[in-house]
Amino acid sequence: MVSPILPQNHLDLDSIGAAEAALGGYDGALLVVSHDRDVLAAIGIEREVTLG
């Protein structure tokens, strides 16, 4: 599933919270591509690879 949580997707705060809760509660592997550190922290990212 690819569902970017980006400002241009026009998600309201409730939708962002629901997406963060769902991703954070998922008990499997996730590959997350995001520039938003708050989202990464909210979903509990444990490992990070940065480019550049």
Image: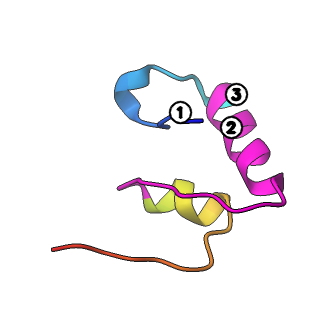
Q: Is residue 20 left or right of residue 35?
A: right
Compared to residue 32, the image places residue 8 above or below, namely above
* Marks 2 and 1 in Cβ contact (< 8 Å): yes
Secondary structure at badge 2 equals helix
CA separation in Å, label 3 and label 1: 16 Å
Report x, y in % for residue 30.
63, 58
- Looking at the picture, tell me which residue is in the foreground, 32 or 18: 32
Q: Amino acid at mark 2?
A: Ala
- Res 27 quadrant in image: bottom right
Q: Quadrant of the N terminus?
A: top right
Residue to which mark 1 is pinned: 3
Residue to which mark 2 is pinned: 19
What residue is shown at x 68% (from left), y 46% (from top)? Answer: 20
Decide which of tag 2 and tag 3 comes sooner along the chain: 3
Residue to which mark 3 is pinned: 14
Compared to residue 14, the image places residue 24 above or below, namely below
Q: Amino acid at mark 1?
A: Ser
Report x, y in % for residue 2.
52, 35
Q: Which residues are magenta?
A: 15-36
CA separation in Å, label 2 and label 1: 9 Å
Crowding at mark 2 (Cα within 10 Å: few <14, some 14-19, many 20+): some
Decide which of tag 2 and tag 1 comes sooner along the chain: 1
Report x, y in % for residue 32.
51, 55
Residue 41 shown in magenta: no
